[in-house]
Image (cartoon, grey):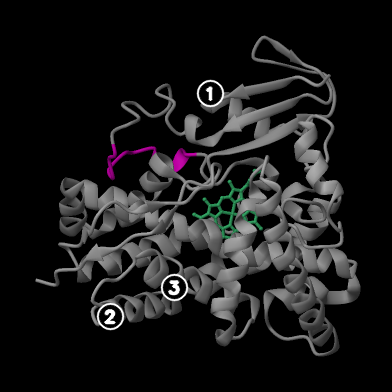
Amino acid sequence: MSGVYVTADYELCRLVLRDRRFSVVPPFHPALPKPVRWLVTKTDLGLPNLGEPPSMLVTDPPDHTRYRRLVGQAFSPKAIATLEKRIAEVADDLVERLESNPRPDLIGDFSAQLPVTIIAEILGLPADMHSTLLKWGDSGAPLLERGLSWTTYRHAIEDLAEVKQYFDQHLDGLTAEPRDDVLSMLVRNDELTRREQVANAALLLDAGFLTTVNMLGNGIVLLTNHPDQLELLAAQPGLWPNAVEEILRYDGPVRMTGRVANCDVDIADQRIESGNLVLLSLAGANSDPAVFPDPRKFDVTRENAAEHLAFSSGIHGCLGARLARLEGTIALRALFDRYPNLSLDGPPVPHPLRNLHAYRCMPVELSVD
Ligand code: HEM
């Protein structure tokens, strides 16, 4: 019988995430409960499920290193800096368009649109695919959770068959005629099998917008509920990047991740036996008072806000963190600069997912004056 440990201690979470004696947890790992593993036996392992290998999220080195190296350059500080102007253009356009909408939903009409537009451009996917990509993201998001109902799982898997078919064809095209985009990097020199290419293309797509949508949504709720912090930002716009860090710390979209000990590990006065599972509460770590004094205070001037673990840490630390930070800073600033008196029109509708803290729908009143 495998043991399961849970921690919300910041230092411990960070240690485990950075310790190579721990591995990622694919959904068929024996440390996971039987019903979770059972679901996987019912599916085609050839489908590009972001929670199953060969998605880099759940693959250990050396394969993980190969996948990440191929696309890493596209998310380097230099590459992301070149996107600043385009992100601002898209954000401004979306902000303008909200005004003609009598009752905008800041998830569907704003928060979801910016990241999907940008990641589609990075990946070289056409603009007329956006609504299909959002649909795939919506059904694929639950795959980041463990312990889904069969109905939710089956629905997600059905859409994955479409994702696979699309990327199979698209990557065939890029193999024949490579372009200057990230997916062309994945097919370069046939370094990866087609299954590895498709799995990681689907991961880049979903990871590229699923969580960013929620960072924006959670940020809008936090800022509208803290008008004093908005006033500070209006007076000192240079604080926006730190405000995004504080949003990620205070209410990051990804609540938890996990690792499995791949040998006996002595840590925090505890022996974790080989094969045992450690659940890491990223949300808990981000509220650890030993690191973040008065942790439930939302403070955009918090000096060490950026030390949060919302993007995880170690070799699986978020590949798109720089991009997400830039999108958050530009989009939230554009929105509140244009609509400083924006208010929620009733409580936002929460997403039923457990590991992704998110809203499904967020009606607002803009009041332009
Ligand atoms: C606010 C937005 C985002 C949040 C909160 C977030 C969070 C995370 C977290 C927590 C992990 C690691 C999970 C673990 O250690 O088990 C991760 C990995 C990853 N993220 Fe993000 N992410 C965001 C945006 C993005 C964007 C925009 C991209 C762009 C493609 C992206 C791509 C990835 C990839 C490819 C991985 C896997 C990295 C690896 O396994 O080496 N993410 N993200």
Task: Name the residue tied to disc 1.
Answer: 9
Q: Residue at x 64, y 60 (%)?
A: 140
Q: Residue at x 64, y 67 (%)?
A: 205
Q: Name the quarter where the C terminus is drawn.
A: bottom left
The mark closer to the camera, 2 or 1, is: 2
Would you say residue 101 sits in the magenta stretch? no
State which quadrant residue 54 falls in: bottom right
Q: Earlier in the sequence, mark 2 or mark 1?
A: 1
Q: Amino acid at mark 1?
A: Asp
Task: Name the residue tied to disc 3.
Answer: 84
The answer to which of 91 and 113 lies nearer the viewer is 113
Q: Amino acid at mark 2?
A: Glu
- Picture coordinates of residue 298 (x, y %)? 29, 39
Q: Is residue 240 above or below residue 5?
A: below
Q: Residue at x 77, y 69 (%)?
A: 161
The label on residue 96 is 2
